[in-house]
Amino acid sequence: KMKAKQENKQKDTLKSSKQESVRALVDGVNPGKSAEELLTMYEGKEDDLIKNLTKMKMKQEKTAELKASQRESVRALVDETNPGKSADELLAMYDGKEDQLIKNLEKMNSKKLVKDKANKQQSVRQLV
């Protein structure tokens, strides 16, 4: 009897620990359902739930890193090209289409570089 009680206590402790992990992950991931709803749905399969929530969290972090990198690229390209709008205005206009924005700014930048080079050559010719 004593051994059975001890095993039950260990199971309860493990289950409680898993529930706390789920609650912490749900707070960070915001999956659209509450921790309690998910725990009810995944009762007995808490390990699967934790694995899925961890994957979601990693995907969200990766997406956030990509967006930050894209914002930096846009800011640098806007500084180089001076397109007439601020980086924040362009990012708001191209929300969700940042790749297209970067592509457009890179085209503008390459055209500007060609034009600048031609202007420099013209200036040199005039000096000679």
Image (cartoon, grey):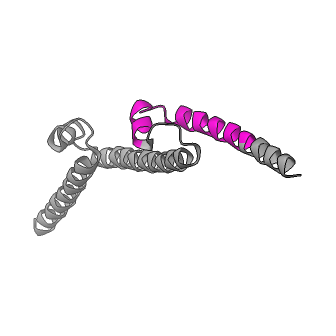
Foreground pick, 102 / 8: 102
Q: Quadrant of the N terminus?
A: bottom left
Query: Is 86 situated left or right of 112 in this image?
Result: left
> Where's residue 17, x and y in %?
21, 59
Left or right, 42 with respect to 65, comes to left
Residue appearing at x 17%, y 40% in the figure = 34
Residue, x 15% and y 67% (percent of image)? 6
Occupied quadrant, residue 122: top right
Lateral position of residue 48 relative to residue 27, left or right: right
Classified by dominant secondary structure, the portion drawn in magenta counts as: helix
Q: Position of residue 115 (x, y in %)?
A: 72, 39
| Foreground pick, 106 / 58 | 106
Left or right, 62 with reference to 31: right
Residue 92 shown in magenta? yes
User: In the displayed image of the protein, which residue is found farthest to the front?
Assistant: 127
Q: Is residue 6 above or below residue 107?
A: below
Q: Percent from the top left, x then y, of residue 8? A: 15, 60
Residue 113 within the segment the image draws in magenta: yes
Number of numbered discs present?
A: 0
* Magenta region: 88-115
Q: Position of residue 93 (x, y in %)?
A: 41, 30
Dividing the picture into quarters, in which one does residue 44 lie?
top left
Query: Which residue is rendered at x = 17% and y = 37% of the image?
Result: 37
